[in-house]
Image (cartoon, grey):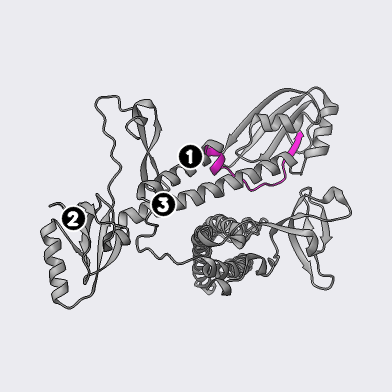
Amino acid sequence: RDAEVPPASALPPIELARGDICSIDGLKATELNGLQCTLFREDTESGRWEVKLPDGEVKALRPAHLIFRSIGPIEDDGSLTLISMASDHQTIHRVLDSVRDLIRTGSEALALLASVVSPMGGRKAQGEEGRIWLKLAKQAENRVRGTLEDLQKNMEQVDGIDASRYGPKAAAEIRLARKDLVQFVQKAQEQLESSLARLRIVLHHLTSTVPSQKPAHGWTEAESLHEKYRAAFEKLEEVVEKGDSSTVRGKTRLSSITVKFQGRGENPPPSDNLYVKGLPGWVTEADLESIFTEVGDIQSMKLKAADWGAIAFIRLANKTQAQRAIAKYNNRVPRLLEKKAEEVDAKRLSAEITKGMLRATVDQLARGITVIVDLRKPLGCVFNDHLVTKSVAEDGQGFELGIRVSWRVRSIGGIKLQNTNELKERMAKLKSEGLKEAAIVFSPPPIVASFAKRPFGFTVAKDADLGLNYVNASNGLARAPGA
């Protein structure tokens, strides 16, 4: 099997597509190297891509100078607003609202898909690491397919409008709005479908490289459930310590920021006061201080941040410094924000992978651990009256299958059990029916911490994503008993 698996380096290079976010590399004009750009149009004759730079300038570059970083969002260039103005039909407006939501969910799915197909993501993963990426890849595939299906259902609603039932003017407006909406959705579908085509290559690679799980219970004999939990929680703690939840969940997709003089209208009079908008929601005053001290002396600053983004009011020492700031940063993405966005993306992906690992462990506990026992051989386990193993012989079948002391039997052959006598009777019946094997589901022992008095020294919260209640803070009183 290993000989048939192609190494990650053998995968074909990522096929670039319109809307991809790339970084520029290897140009003789070194001032462009390192900048991020968005692929706009491919010139098939020259083989070059027309790319948009952060300041809006368009360049034509060869693919060799473009390094894939991510897949850009599904963009609305104002088409949906124009469509909403073209017709007052309720169905069209209801579909427009749905399409706007699908653009957001589809863009989120593309961001996850991009992390999988990236050279630094699933394309290089193998073995157990590949198993995690395979789950993320399937997750991304399902999300993208779901968005495609929902877009198609919305188009069917629009196609079902009978324009002939309305007057000439209203009918013409409906046909025009329907035509423009179909064109917009078709472009979005093309972007989603082309991304799926790139994902299939990585899916095939991951499916080929991920090793099969030989133990029925999913981990080695030497690794207990407690050890799996401990490793998963320690990893999760590392992620949390590196950045708070707002950082992990913050908006990381960057667009050019707007820097202009404060005041009403598009062209307020020059002053030392600046208005800055288009900032990501995770930006801090320290970030802005690092950016704007490059052009002048900050006299005062006020930052207003939310999940959707942030704005800032900054006063510099004089008009000259303010004009310098506008010239340098208006309609651009400051390098410091680009660098921090990459760090935020890495933390978010790390948190998502870690939560996926922990979720898999929790799901396994909820399902129980299934072992297939040979009914022709002794199990080598001694149970108390309540189906809990008191001892497991190291040379017996049970120990080899991974069964350990304090594990409790839940069912055999799909039949739930209440006591050990029922287990014996059921095994005897299966043997009498000529069966050679049976599936027994076990529950490993819970982690128990005993407290002699209050306060216990810990607080509990709920993680909505994982569906878990967990200890979110503890002190020495709780840590001593093991919480």
Distance from disc 3 to disc 2, alpha carbons, whole Å, reads 32 Å
Quadrant placement of the C terminus:
top left
- Give the number of callouts: 3
Cβ–Cβ below 8 Å for labels 1 and 2?
Answer: no
Secondary structure of residue under mark 1: helix
Disc ID at residue 237? 1
Q: Which residue is mark 3?
A: 359
Which of the 4 quarters of the picture holds residue 282?
top right
Picture coordinates of residue 162, whole percent (x, y): 51, 73
Distance from disc 1 to disc 2, alpha carbons, whole Å, reads 38 Å
Which residue does the image show at 62% across and 46% down from the upper left? 252
Secondary structure of residue under mark 2: strand
> Would you say residue 153 sits in the magenta stretch?
no
Looking at marks 1 and 3 on the same chain, the residue that comes earlier in the sequence is marked by 1
Of residues 203 and 392, which is closer to you in this image? Answer: 392
The vertical placement of 399 against 152, above or below, is above
Picture coordinates of residue 298, whole percent (x, y): 75, 24
Kind of residue sitting beneath label 3? Arg
Q: What span is colored magenta in the figure?
A: 244-260
Distance from disc 1 to disc 3, alpha carbons, whole Å, reads 15 Å
Classed neighbour count for the residue bearing mark 2: other residues with Cα under 10 Å, few (<14), some (14–19), many (≥20): some
Which of the 4 quarters of the picture holds residue 481?
top left
Judged by depth in the image, the label closer to the viewer, 1 or 2, is 2
Disc ID at residue 382? 2
